[in-house]
Amino acid sequence: MQPTPEITHFWRDFAAAEASLQTLSLSERVERANALLEPHVQGLALEIMGKEGEAVVDLIVTAHGHIENFQRLTQLVAAAPKLAHNRVIAFRERSANPDFPIGMDGFELASHEVLVSLQQDNGQVALELRFAREIPYDFVDHARQMTFIMLDHVLGEFDFAVKVGAVDFVDEDFEQDQAWIALSQLPPVFDAYWAQTMGHTGHFPAGEHDWEGFDLQFNCAVDDEGNEVADSDLPEGEAGESEQGEVMVNTSANAVAMRADLAWALSLDFATPDDATRTAVQDLQAQAATLLQVPQLGIGVWTLQREGRRQALYYVSDEQLAKQALAPLLAREVAASLEMKVDFDPAWSGYFEYASYLL
């Protein structure tokens, strides 16, 4: 993807100023670097990791965990020129030492004083938290805020924002049988839970993929508790608006869910007015999955047949390369009704909208 003019202008200004930045202290360099960034790119910030006097330091681009700015962050990093004194890195990485204290308004809390329990949460990891020591009432809010800061440092910006779902603090009513670990010990436990319990190994599935299907009702009426209401129970004039859909989910794709390099959700949606067209579209969408998977450019994750259209969703590493790979296929006559959509979706919410019924 071509960088925006604003990103291009920033890197031009930064490259021109790099030699003079090198004469400043690290703190002054960070301040000056962000002053160069702010007029061009909003929602992002620069941090520097290194020691005074080092010829080359890490220039970290962060969105402070705001996932809505991750697309802009990846575009900024991808457009970085070769620099003499800076290695450009996307996202704040995990702390090398996960056992550390932080302070706020005279109150101090260490990461080993926070306990964590892991649960599954629709493809993500839910965290339950409690404190291993008594927290003065006036500092409970401080302690919780500090815990979120520590989680960002312990897990790293991307993993905390993308892989972690619900985060809840529990008090005395916590489940006694749950496994609890100190926050300072979380990284290896989290990684093992992610790969072994959740099945997100990060490896492209080999061989034939496993697909599971089910029927789903769309636009159906529900009661206050979310339960489906039969048309016969609805007031006159409100029945008959629900739609039937047939969903097929690639459960094997769960292995690469939320990989940082597979953040683009690409949808191919076609009209299927008759059985012959439906079969032709089905074959085309399957061929598209193969074209993306063989070079590990992407993976097909589900198909949906609904109201005379058939949609397939793929997660790809590069929008433009994926479109180029699929261009000959999509030039066929059967693809004349194509509606293509691409969204930045690092948390794979589009996949788990349906996969959560099965996994």
Image: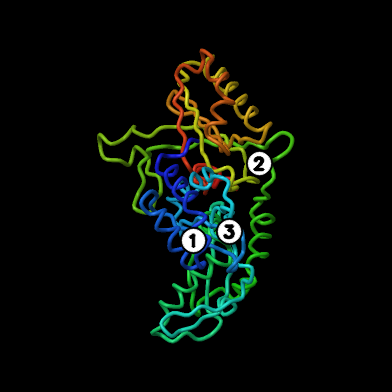
Distance from label 3 to label 2 (Cα)?
36 Å
Local crowd at mark 2 within 10 Å, few (<14), some, or many (≥20)? many
Q: Nearer the viewer, mark 1 or mark 3?
A: 3
Q: Viewer-proximal residue, 264 or 33?
A: 33
Q: Amino acid at mark 2?
A: Ser
Q: Position of residue 4 (x, y in %)?
A: 42, 39
Q: Which residue is mark 1?
A: 166
Q: Amino acid at mark 1?
A: Ala
Q: Which residue appears at 66% of the width and 41% of the height?
A: 252
Q: Amino acid at mark 3?
A: Asp
Could you tell me if the residues under marks 1 and 3 are in contact, i.e. CB atoms within 8 Å? Answer: no
Q: Viewer-proximal residue, 333 or 53?
A: 53
In the image: residue 275, left or right of residue 308: right
Q: Which residue is mark 3?
A: 58
First in sequence: mark 3 or mark 2? 3
Q: Position of residue 253 (x, y in %)?
A: 63, 41
Distance from label 1 to label 3 (Cα)?
31 Å
Q: Is residue 166 above or below residue 354?
A: below
